[in-house]
Image (cartoon, grey):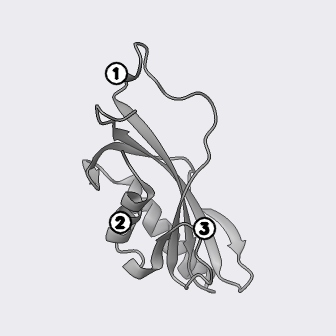
């Protein structure tokens, strides 16, 4: 099973932001040059193969990444693009103890969401981690 904690570690190891500035969940008073990792809402039925759960070989972890950078729009966009390009090129990936079959970037580019209340530029990236499901995973 793939968890937010695992995804957080993966994003931290990409080296875009310092480890202490990559977080999961809500972080009050976000630091500049930080990246937040959140579960993304999904709808529709559970993804179960014909034949049932025992025939289902993969799972999908839907993630939203918030790149909360600084007051310079060019530097902020560059950081978001760097993260996006790194994930776009991923192959043969293991996150935590989970084999990732592939990443699906659900947006064509990082989405500019403007600035927060303090003038820090932010970008959002949606990515699906398609992972090898463990046999005991229900």
In percent of width and height, residue 35 lies at: 50, 72
**Looking at this rendering, what residue extends furthest in the right direction?**
117
Closer mark to the observer between disc 3 and disc 1: 1
Residue depicted at x 71% and y 78%:
116
Q: Secondary structure at mark 1?
A: helix
Left or right, 50 with reference to 117: left
- In the foreground, 12 or 29: 29
Q: Looking at the figure, which quarter contains the C terminus? A: top left
- In the foreground, 104 or 10: 10
Residue holding disc 1: 54
When the figure is inspected, residue 8 is found, relative to residue 49, above or below; the finding is below
Residue holding disc 2: 9
In percent of width and height, residue 94 lies at: 26, 51
- In the foreground, 73 or 103: 103
Task: Please tell me how crowded label 1 is: few (under 14), some (14-19), or many (20+) other residues with Cα within 10 Å.
Answer: some
Q: Earlier in the sequence, mark 3 or mark 1?
A: 1
Q: Secondary structure at mark 3?
A: strand
Residue depicted at x 35% and y 35%:
137
Q: CA distance from mark 3 to mark 1?
A: 39 Å
Q: Which mark is residue 123?
A: 3
Task: Please tell me how crowded label 2 is: few (under 14), some (14-19), or many (20+) other residues with Cα within 10 Å.
Answer: some
- 2 and 1 marks in contact (CB < 8 Å): no
Q: CA distance from mark 2 to mark 3?
A: 20 Å
Closer mark to the observer between disc 2 and disc 1: 1
Q: Earlier in the sequence, mark 2 or mark 1?
A: 2
């Amino acid at each position: 099973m793939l968890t937010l904690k695992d995804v957080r570690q993966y994003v931290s190891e990409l080296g875009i932001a310092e480890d202490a500035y990559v977080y999961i969940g809500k972080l009050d008073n976000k630091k500049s040059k930080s990246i937040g990792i959140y579960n993304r809402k999904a709808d529709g039925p559970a993804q179960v193969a014909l034949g049932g759960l025992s025939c289902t070989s993969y799972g999908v972890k839907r993630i939203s990444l918030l790149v909360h950078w600084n007051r310079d729009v060019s530097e902020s966009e560059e950081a978001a693009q760097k993260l996006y390009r790194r994930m776009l090129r991923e192959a043969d990936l293991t996150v935590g103890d989970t084999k990732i079959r592939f990443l699906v970037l659900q947006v064509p580019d990082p989405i500019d969401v403007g600035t927060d209340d303090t003038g820090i530029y932010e970008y959002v990236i949606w990515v699906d981690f398609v992972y090898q499901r463990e046999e005991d995973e229900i």
